[in-house]
Amino acid sequence: METAEFLERSQNMKNNNENILSRRSVLQGLGASAAALGIFSMTHSLTADDLPRDANGNVIPGFGEDDKQTRREIKENSGKWEKKSDRKIRVGIAGYGLCQFGSHFFYQNHPNVEVVAATDLDPGRCKALANAVGAQKTYPSCEEMIKDKSIEAIYIATDAPSHARLAIMALNHDKHVVSAVPAVFGFEAEEDAEELFAAVKKSGKKYMMNETSTFHADLYAKRMQYQAGALGKIIYSEGEYYHDGVGAIGSYNPQNGKIDLNGWRRALPPMWYPTHATAYYVSVTGGGRLTEVSCLGTPGLYPEYKDGNNTHKNPFGTEVAMFKTSEGGMSRMAVSWDMKNAHGEQGRVYGQKPHNNKINGARPALPPGVGAGGHGGSHGQLTNDFIESILLDRKPIVDISEALNMTMSGVIAHQSALKDGQWMKVPQYDL
Ligand SMILES: NC(=O)c1ccc[n+]([C@@H]2O[C@H](COP(=O)([O-])OP(=O)(O)OC[C@H]3O[C@@H](n4cnc5c(N)ncnc54)[C@H](O)[C@@H]3O)[C@@H](O)[C@H]2O)c1
């Protein structure tokens, strides 16, 4: 990146993050007093001022959706949420970085959850997270929090490279784990996938990956169709995650502990972050898998990709993968950080039989106080699904097998792109 451009992007980010934290402190202060008076059922309600922004001050895509509208739709089609248990799962939350995911998933509002602890490596972000989720205890790291024997489940909302390591550690300490995407990341992904899968199997605990596309209204409706047998086999599916300039939103940089433009998002190989796209086959079918891949990439438009001279050794800004599927179909998945006028997390699915309008594809009702949230109204759904999977001892909607297929298919796709589209097999992890 040119020095002047880098400095400008960094300064914008710094100002923006400081503004976010100061706006949040005011709101959290208001939230705490109001909650004490019993005015709000939520620890804090999100306003436009309270949302994560990129280096240019724009709200990061996926946040800032019309929560009321989504909730209205769900209520009309799914009726009332039914309480499954009086039990409260004791949850510890890790990570309050740029996207502030630690507080955006409504754990603090779920009637079957007690958020007992919060952590972030940065003391300021740790305190802000604890305030936002009403946690009494804080820990200087997720590693320390995992040792707390009173915690039953850990929500990992830290940077992508740390997910697998922290999830494995938490499972080995007998905790249920829910992790932000992706499940595994980087050059260690294949090794970590083996270890993570083994840790889930050995512990017998729940593991879920919070893939937000899974609870997009259109994907969920197709899932209901598929699972009722209405569509037959999926002949062809396609999924996309397009986010021009993703590297400009900053991310955790382990070199200095800050969130800046030299963190893990810098020159990120598109297919190392594939799950918003690959969910459009894996989450629709549940049991369907991406099995073989041929992928192509194009040289990234921004300077940090030039000749792959970056920590990820990645030259590509856009990658498009063609997959074979386990039911004999095919699937095209694309991720891009540099195409103009391309944005969004979306997909399409085509089966052997037509969509049956008589099948109700509405997403489940949500508990009182739990919002639908961002990324297509998926945040509250993911949280409720994970908590109910523990309460009812059932499979979470994105379990370890699906999480690894959604993630590893992209990891192998990137390897294929580096070999100019060579067909490669995706390792399978079925419980
Ligand atoms: N639609 C989606 O599903 C979606 C959207 C945005 C972000 N995400 C995911 O959410 C996660 C968080 O994103 P972000 O942009 O806020 O990340 P980030 O890189 O900005 O911040 C990560 C945070 O984790 C903290 N952290 C790192 N290691 C830790 C440890 N061992 N213990 C405690 N804290 C630790 C860091 O201090 C930092 O505050 C990422 O994994 C990202 O992939 C998913």
Image (cartoon, rainbow, N blue to C red):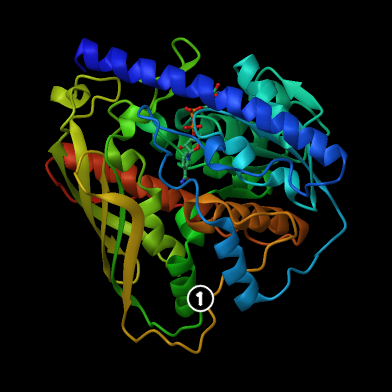
Labels in figure, total: 1
Task: Specify whether 365 is left or right of 164.
Answer: right
The structure residue drawn at horizontal position 70% and vertical position 45%, both measured from the top left corner, is 107
Q: Quadrant of the N terminus?
A: top left
Q: Quadrant of the C terminus?
A: bottom right
Instruction: Name the spot of residue 307 as percent of width and height, x first.
Output: 13, 23
The structure residue drawn at horizontal position 67% and vertical position 34%, both measured from the top left corner, is 93
The image quadrant that residue 33 belongs to is: top right
Q: Is 159 above or below relative to 225?
A: above
The structure residue drawn at horizontal position 24% and vertical position 53%, both measured from the top left corner, is 293
Task: Specify whether 19 is left or right of 41.
Answer: left
Instruction: Name the spot of residue 390 as percent of width and height, x first.
Output: 73, 54
Q: Amino acid at mark 1?
A: Met
Task: Specify whether 416 is left or right of 188.
Answer: left
Q: Nearer the viewer, residue 389 or 2?
A: 2
Q: Is 29 above or below relative to 274?
A: above
Instruction: Name the spot of residue 408 as percent of width and height, x first.
Output: 38, 45
Q: Which residue is mark 1?
A: 224
Whether residue 168 is visible to the viewer of this picture, yes or no, is yes
